[in-house]
Amino acid sequence: TRLECVRSMLERSGSLPVHVSKGWQSTIMEEEILELVLAHLPRIASIDLLITKGMPMLTTAPEIMPTRGYTLRSLSLTFCYPRIEISCLRGIKFPNLVSLTWAGGNHPVVPELLNPGIISLDLDFCDTTRVSLSSMLAMLAPLQNFEEFRLRDVLCADDFNADGTQKS
């Protein structure tokens, strides 16, 4: 089966970095594969996922996961529904993360993922999860090495006057 194949490849690869790229469907097999791969989070170098629904392994923080020592350099998550939550990353530090793309989904964990080494940041929180300008500026304050920076549907319209200037 595909699950057995993935398990075998993870075992054969030993301690080599893992790259995850998949548009996840909502089948039991796909969820089992994702759970198996996420168990190797400390050695994952890049993640590029299309998340089509909330899955238990994404919304439940792992019981025994170190908070440091991860090699993740690139994280790209695109959510099909804005209310999907990813709390499995909460409290984990990714000091090597240089690229973060977050489109849709529930964003409270995003500030925890940011570190001064981020050079590429692409945020699209969609209409239901926008943040205030002051919250966004506070979140971005420690980041000073941008080479690429994109914001879409992130800021609340309530923070601006009709002419586009910021409200005091």
Image (cartoon, rainbow, N blue to C red):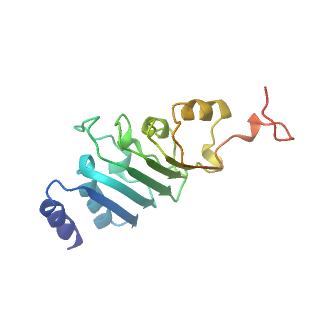
Residue 140: percent from left, percent from top: 56, 35
In the figure, is residue 119 to the left or right of 134?
A: left
Residue at the extreme bottom of the image, as rendered = 1
Does residue 52 lie above or below 86 as drawn? below
Q: Position of residue 154 (x, y in %)?
A: 64, 45
Q: Quadrant of residue 67?
A: top left
Total count of labels? 0
Residue 168 percent location from the top left of the image: 78, 25
| Front residue (pair 148, 91) | 148
On the image, the x and y values in percent for residue 7 come to: 17, 63
Q: Residue at x 21, y 66 (%)?
A: 6
Q: Quadrant of residue 3?
A: bottom left
Of residue 4 and residue 56, the one placed in the foreground of this image is 4
- Which residue appears at 46% of the width and 46% of the height? 85
The image quadrant where one finds the N terminus is bottom left
Question: Relative to 23, is 9 on the left or the right?
Answer: left
* Residue 74 position (above or below residue 167): below
* Left or right: residue 97 compared with residue 4: right
Q: Residue furthest right?
A: 163
| Residue at image point 12% right, 63% down | 12
- Residue 33's image quarter? bottom left
Q: Is residue 23 left or right of residue 120?
A: left
Q: Residue furthest top?
A: 168
> In front here: 165 or 105?
165
